[in-house]
Image: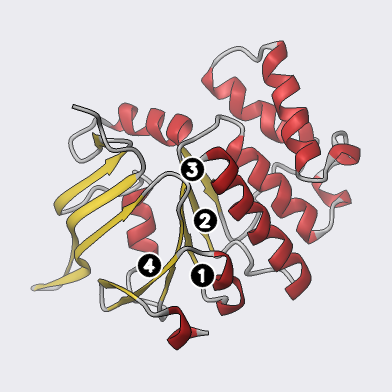
Amino acid sequence: MTKTKGLQLNEVSKYYAEGSNRIAALDHVSISVKPGEFVAVVGPSGSGKSTFLSVAGALLQASEGEAKLNGHSISTLTAQELANIRLQEIGFIMQSSNLVPYLTVLDQLLIIKRMSGKVKRKDKEFAVKLLEELGLGSKLNSFPEELSGGEKQRTAIARALINNPGIILADEPTASLDTKRAHEVVSLIAQEVKSGQKAAVMVTHDERMLEYCDKVYRMEDGRLSLAVLESIV
């Protein structure tokens, strides 16, 4: 039987204790994101978006329900197994680029490969190719302080892609960018999703970016529902 690729959450709930009360940060959330599909999750602050992304990214375990990455359930894995999945199968793109200040652009990518083992010649060649594709070929030896905001986020995208993960999770990737650079960054993510057949989820408040997405979901009070794009933009 062929395992389903991509990301699946089935009736996932995440509860927190608050005094004698039980608060549902996620309330029976179900979603399926297939390879080559780019979806957005919108909603007010405190609606559960960050918890959703943490469960999808194997950073938090669900209280109920099942989360699957590329057909593998992550609900019962050990801490080490989850760490390996985060490194090998998930590319994270955060609000801040979170680049290491003392590493060059190229080394930002190679340090991820070192975490997986020895860096091979083909790894360096792939990193250079990836950076060139993202318009950073002239910045390989530059440090973060020498980059613009857009260049930092493009470096972060390349770093998220260096292990060729099947899943991309982006948390407010345009939060610190102006309109031009925001479109540039999300357009690049969308291109990588399509060309690399990756399943991608972007949590965002930036409604300008929804045009790049195949589907838009709305999160409210821990519940996820498919939104009508025309009613949001």
Residue 164, quarter of the rendered image: top right
Cα distance, mark 4 to mark 1?
A: 9 Å
Cα distance, mark 1 to mark 2?
A: 8 Å
The answer to which of marks 3 and 1 sits earlier in the sequence is 3
| 98 relative position to 16: left or right | right
The answer to which of marks 1 and 2 sits earlier in the sequence is 2
Cα distance, mark 3 to mark 2?
A: 13 Å
Q: Are marks 1 and 2 in contact (CB under 8 Å)?
A: yes
Q: Are marks 3 and 1 in contact (CB under 8 Å)?
A: no
Q: Which residue is mark 2?
A: 170
SS of the residue under disc 1: loop
Q: Is disc 1 surrounded by few (<14), some (14 to 19) or many (20+) residues within 10 Å?
A: many
Q: Which residue is mark 3?
A: 198
Q: Nearer the viewer, residue 60 or 44?
A: 44
Q: Nearer the viewer, residue 50 or 210?
A: 210
Say if 191 sits above or below 205 in the image: above
Whole-percent x, y for residue 137 in the image: 86, 37
Q: Residue at x 18, y 70 (%)?
A: 24
The answer to which of marks 4 and 3 sits earlier in the sequence is 4
Q: Which residue is mark 1?
A: 204
Residue 49 is marked as 4
SS of the residue under disc 3: loop
Q: Is residue 103 visible?
A: no
Say if 227 sits above or below 124 in the image: below
Whole-percent x, y for residue 227 in the image: 36, 77
The answer to which of marks 3 and 2 sits earlier in the sequence is 2
Q: Is disc 2 surrounded by few (<14), some (14 to 19) or many (20+) residues within 10 Å?
A: many
Cα distance, mark 4 to mark 3?
A: 21 Å
The N terminus sits in image quarter: top left
Q: Is disc 4 surrounded by few (<14), some (14 to 19) or many (20+) residues within 10 Å?
A: many
Q: Residue at x 55, y 23 (%)?
A: 115
